[in-house]
Amino acid sequence: MNNNNQYDHDVIDDDLYEEIDDEALFELVEQERKKSLARTRQEKENPKPKRPFPKWAFWLIAIALIFNLVALLPKTFSIAAIDFLMTSAKLSAQDDISTYKKAVVVVETNDGKGTGFAISSDGTIITNHHVIEGEDSVTVAFPDNGLYQADVIADYPDVDIAVLHVEGKDLPHLTLAEKTTVSSEEPIYFIGNPLYFNGIANKGTIIGYTQLNDWNERVLMIEAPVYRGNSGSPVINEQGKVIGVVFATLDHDIHGKVGLFIPIDYFYEHYNGAKGDS
């Protein structure tokens, strides 16, 4: 199923990079702590006469708290997020998925994290350009092999792909498909580090191609739970081959919110290095 319609850039979330701002969080906590201390001092200096607390007010506050909690869930730990954690646990029990996960790394910069995956035993890693933008080197973490310093050896902003390299040997790695061959409703797997989690495996289905306004190349849409932190996640077909790289989400006028991935063909077109060990 092909879809050649164009979509406005403002409905595309092309930065699934998970930003972490500890200073801002600390500042907010500190402000609330100071406010609390100020209120406590004021209450001690000017005590108010106690009066019975009305039951209706208690229930009103309880309802308001529940409402606020429900409103916050989509931002922090949505029902969909709980669902993808359960799906990941089931998939991770499969031997093939468990093996794939060993090659998927956390890519850490000074500002946050994304995902990458090794394609050779000696440390070649693919991720998104926007994950490592402005960096010459980053830290990557393999689930079983620990931390490595990775150099950015190639960067292709036009197709949002970057290539990293770490000094290692006998590293777990994924095999790339020779080319991206897909059909509508074809099932796929993808593994990444969404939200505050690492090594989350999930599944989805291929919808078809679409053309973005500021891209010369077409990209593929998937019906799948893609979140911030999934940037750089490998999209794996049922044969265990990587056919693309997750980089964005799109609010589609027909399919709703969908994930977008870059066909692995574009990596071959730009990078002349190894295709990964078979």
Image (cartoon, rainbow, N blue to C red):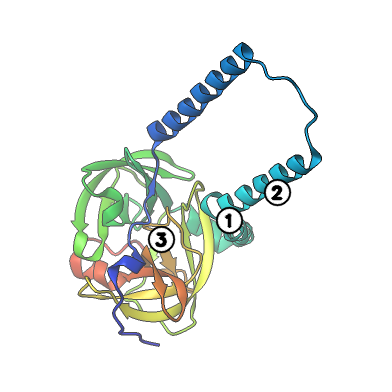
Residue at 24% x, 74% y is 213
How crowded pointer 1 is (Cα within 10 Å; few <14, some 14-19, many 20+) is rated as some
State the SS at label 3.
Answer: loop
Q: Point out residue 95 in the picture as x, y percentages from the top left corner.
A: 58, 61
Residue at 70% x, 48% y is 63
Q: Is 25 on the left or on the right of 262, as rendered? A: right
Q: Is 99 on the left or on the right of 245, as rendered? A: right
How crowded pointer 2 is (Cα within 10 Å; few <14, some 14-19, many 20+) is rated as few
Residue at which label 2 appears: 63
Amino acid found under the numbered disc labelled 2: Ile
> Looking at the image, which residue sits at the far top?
45
Residue at which label 3 appears: 174
Residue 271 can be seen, yes or no: no
Instruction: Say which label, 1 or 3, has the lower sequence index.
Output: 1
Q: Is residue 209 above or below residue 233?
A: below
Residue at which label 1 appears: 78
Instruction: Say which label, 1 or 2, has the lower sequence index.
Output: 2
Q: Quadrant of the C terminus?
A: bottom left
Q: Point out residue 194 in the picture as x, y percentages from the top left corner.
A: 47, 53
